[in-house]
Image (spheres, rainbow, N blue to C red):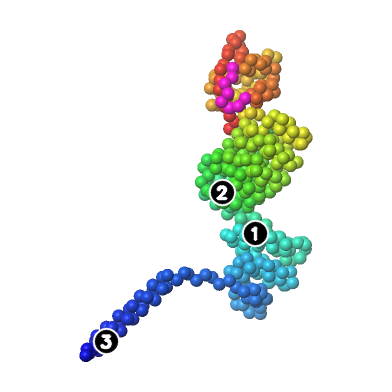
Amino acid sequence: MIRTTPLSLMAVVSLFLALGIVTAFAEDAEAPPDKKPQPSTEQILKWVRDLDSDRFVHRETATKKLVDAGRAAIVPLTKHLPKTGLEVTTRGIFVLRELALDNDDETAEAARLALEKLSKPAGTSVARRASSTLAELDQMRQARAIQELKSLGAIIGTRYVQVGQAILPNVFSVQIGPNWNGKTEDLRRLRWLGDVRQIELSGPTVTDATLAHVGKMKNLTIVMIKRAKITNAGIAHLKSLSAVQYIAIFYCPVDDMSIAHLKVHERATLLKLYGTQISKDGAKRLKEAMANATIDHRDGAFLGVGAAVHPLGCSISIVQPDSAAAKAGLQVNDIIVKYDGEKVTDFQKLTQLIGANRAGDKVTIEVLRGEEKLTKKLTLGEWK
């Protein structure tokens, strides 16, 4: 018979306790973290009612609980607010404002829609507060979106923009180009940029998914797309931009199938289509459908000169630095008389001849420089 001394018994008990504790810790480590319990409809309705409680602490608690409840609180709160007094209105609008700033897009959108609903009809206390909150939200969300987009490589600010022959100063613009290091879903912030009027997209990171986000920028008037991996389906996303007046698409693989999506822009006055796969016949049909717009359709070559009328042809007034013209040695006051064997009568004729070429084409240009006649062979560039 084995006798157990008190000391050894204590050791055994300690061992079992230790094992039990270790097991308990192991079970706790393996157990998934508790999810935040969702409030019931009854709880939410109670908190909505408590916004009108006689006790301040109950009103404060209810306000916080409704914010924490998230999207589930929006509908009950929206139904209740038009029937309440000043303090409940103030607290309820505050809750919707906080939810409209939520990182969850669906919650934020639902709260904003609720505020828009409460802002109509105008004239009531609820409507006035909802309207002022919407205006405040727009500025807050825009400021936050600008900061976040800039951190991802977007260029945002006012700049000069040339539309045809006109120079527009101080246009609030966004540029998404080579410096962009964000993901496509990061562009969802574009829809909060209500003050932006122009967007410029360039490079292979620009796709149809990019244009889906651009299509939500309702106040855009100028859209410029260069060397992007977009299709006709991507152009369809721009149909919702009813305020657009100028569209430029350079060196993108869209074709005549995009005409149906472009012609809906009734307010557009200028479309530039350079280096696309849209045919001359397609451009003609687009012009017929958009009688008030100038359709500037070219195959995409760029010479790099500005010129004035001259009795013998075109007198060069500007030579763009680093252009095909500059590289070939063309100079200001040179008179272009022939372009690839065809006589140049004016700048419009020269532009037409260049527009029939693509970037990389080799052409011959005859110029007069004083009494000297020169022949220049050059490789055409592309529009920047």
- Magenta region, mostly helix, strand or loop? loop
Which residue does the numbered mark 1 point to in the structure image?
A: 109
Count of picture labels? 3
In depth, the one of 273 and 129 nearer the eye is 273
Q: Position of residue 71 (x, y in %)?
A: 63, 65
Question: Start and end of the magenta stretch?
Answer: 357-364
Q: CA distance from mark 1 to mark 3?
A: 66 Å
151 lies left or right of 24: right
Question: Is tag 2's residue or tag 3's residue first in the polypeptide sequence?
Answer: 3
Residue 358 covered by magenta stretch? yes
Give the quadrant of residue 155. Answer: top right
* Residue type (three-letter) at the residue carrying disc 1: Glu
Q: Which residue is mark 3?
A: 9
Q: Which mark is residue 184?
A: 2
Local SS, label 2: helix
State the residue at coordinates (65%, 65%).
96
The vertical placement of 379 against 370, above or below, is below
| Identity of the residue furthest to the front in this view | 1
**Which of the 4 image quadrants contains residue 308?**
top right
Residue at (28%, 83%) from the top-left corner? 12
Q: Image quadrant for the C terminus?
A: top right
* x then y, percent, for residue 26: 39, 72
The mark closer to the camera, 2 or 1, is 2
Which one is closest to the eye, mark 2 or mark 3?
A: 3
Magenta run includes residue 286: no
